[in-house]
C-alpha cells in the first residue's frame, strides 16, 4: 500500500513535468524556428497555425486533467447514509460498496459508483462522474504528444539536415544520434529533443490505445473493474451506453473541457 500511495504522488508529478518540458520546447525552440521562414505570410504563417493548434490540444488535455482530479466519483455510501439519517460514515461506505457497480478504493478511502479503475496519473478514481473527462484527457494527451513528435521531428530534420522520408529513419535516429552525441557532432539540446521525440511517441501511442480500450468497454456497457471481476452486465444498445457517459452535449465536451453535463447520470441526480 505504501508503494501505491507513493506512486499516487510520483505519477502526477511526472505528468506535470513532461507537460512543462513540452511547453518550454514548443515555446522557445519549435516556434522560433518556424518564425524564421521568410516566405510565410503573417496571417497564415506556420508558427501561428502551429501555436494555435498546440494551445488548443494542450488546453483540452490540461483542462480535462484538472476536471478529472476535481470531480470525484459519486460516493453512494455517503448519499445513502445522509438519506438514512446518518448511521455513521463507516457504515455508509460499507453499504455503498455493496451496491451494484460500486467499489471501495483504499487509496481514495471511498466507494465510487460505476468504478472503472484508480488512475495514478490523476491520483483519483475513475467512475460515473469523471469518465467522460478522463477519456477526453487521454484523447487530447495522445494528440498533443503525437503532434509534438511531428513538430520535433521537423525541427530536428532542419537542424541536423536529416530526412524522415524513409520509413526506418525514425527508428534509426536514436542509435545514430547517440554515437554522434559522444563524438561531439550533436549538441546536448538536440540530443534532448531527440529523446523527447521517443517519449512523446510512446506516451501518444499508449494514451491512444487506452482511450480506444475505454471506448470499447463503454460501447459494451462495461467497466474495467467488472471485466477484472468477471461480472456479466445486461446487454443494452450501444447508443444508450455512449449517451450515459458522454451525455447529449457531447460535441461541447469534445471542443472545450467542461463537466459531464447532459448525461443520464446528472439527469437522474437532479430529479
Image: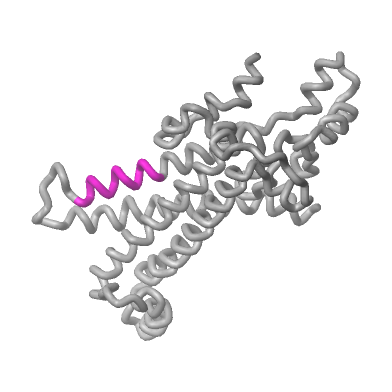
Residue 267: name its quadrant: top right
Q: Residue at x 62, y 32 (%)?
A: 129
List x then y, in percent, for residue 232: 75, 46
Q: Main secondary structure of the magenta part?
A: helix
List x then y, in percent, for residue 202: 49, 63
221 left or right, relative to 256: right
- Asked whether residue 126 is drawn in magenta, I would say no
Vertical comparison of 111 with 37: above or below: above
Closer to the camera in the image, 117 or 14: 117
Q: Which residues are magenta?
A: 46-57
Quadrant location, the C terminus: top right
List x then y, in percent, for residue 107: 76, 44
Q: Residue at x 36, y 78 (%)?
A: 168
157 left or right, relative to 195: left
Q: Residue at x 77, y 22 (%)?
A: 79
112 left or right, relative to 239: right
Amino acid at each position: 500500500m505504501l508503494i501505491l500511495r507513493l506512486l499516487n504522488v510520483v505519477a502526477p508529478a511526472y505528468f506535470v513535468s513532461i507537460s512543462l518540458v513540452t511547453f518550454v520546447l514548443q515555446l522557445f525552440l519549435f516556434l522560433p524556428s518556424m518564425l524564421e521562414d521568410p516566405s510565410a505570410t503573417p496571417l497564415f504563417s506556420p508558427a501561428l497555425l502551429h501555436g494555435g493548434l498546440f494551445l488548443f490540444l494542450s488546453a483540452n488535455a490540461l483542462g480535462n486533467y484538472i476536471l478529472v482530479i476535481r470531480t470525484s466519483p459519486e460516493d453512494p455510501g455517503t448519499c445513502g447514509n445522509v438519506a438514512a439519517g446518518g448511521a455513521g460514515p463507516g457504515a455508509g461506505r460499507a453499504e455503498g460498496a455493496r451496491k451494484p457497480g460500486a467499489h471501495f478504493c483504499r487509496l481514495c478511502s471511498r466507494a465510487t459508483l460505476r468504478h472503472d479503475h484508480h488512475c495514478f496519473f490523476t491520483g483519483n478514481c475513475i467512475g460515473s462522474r469523471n469518465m467522460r473527462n478522463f477519456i477526453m484527457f487521454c484523447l487530447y494527451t495522445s494528440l498533443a504528444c503525437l503532434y509534438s513528435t511531428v513538430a520535433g521531428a521537423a525541427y530536428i530534420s532542419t537542424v541536423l539536415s536529416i530526412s524522415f522520408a524513409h520509413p526506418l529513419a525514425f527508428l534509426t535516429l536514436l542509435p545514430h544520434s547517440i554515437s554522434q552525441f559522444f563524438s561531439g557532432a550533436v549538441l546536448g539540446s538536440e540530443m534532448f529533443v531527440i529523446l523527447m521525440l521517443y517519449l512523446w511517441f510512446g506516451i501518444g501511442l499508449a494514451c491512444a490505445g487506452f482511450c480506444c480500450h475505454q471506448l470499447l468497454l463503454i460501447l459494451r456497457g462495461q467497466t474495467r473493474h467488472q471485466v477484472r471481476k468477471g461480472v456479466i452486465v445486461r446487454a443494452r444498445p450501444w447508443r444508450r451506453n455512449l449517451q450515459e457517459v458522454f451525455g447529449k452535449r457531447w460535441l461541447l465536451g469534445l471542443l472545450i473541457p467542461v463537466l459531464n453535463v447532459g448525461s443520464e447520470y446528472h439527469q437522474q441526480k437532479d430529479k
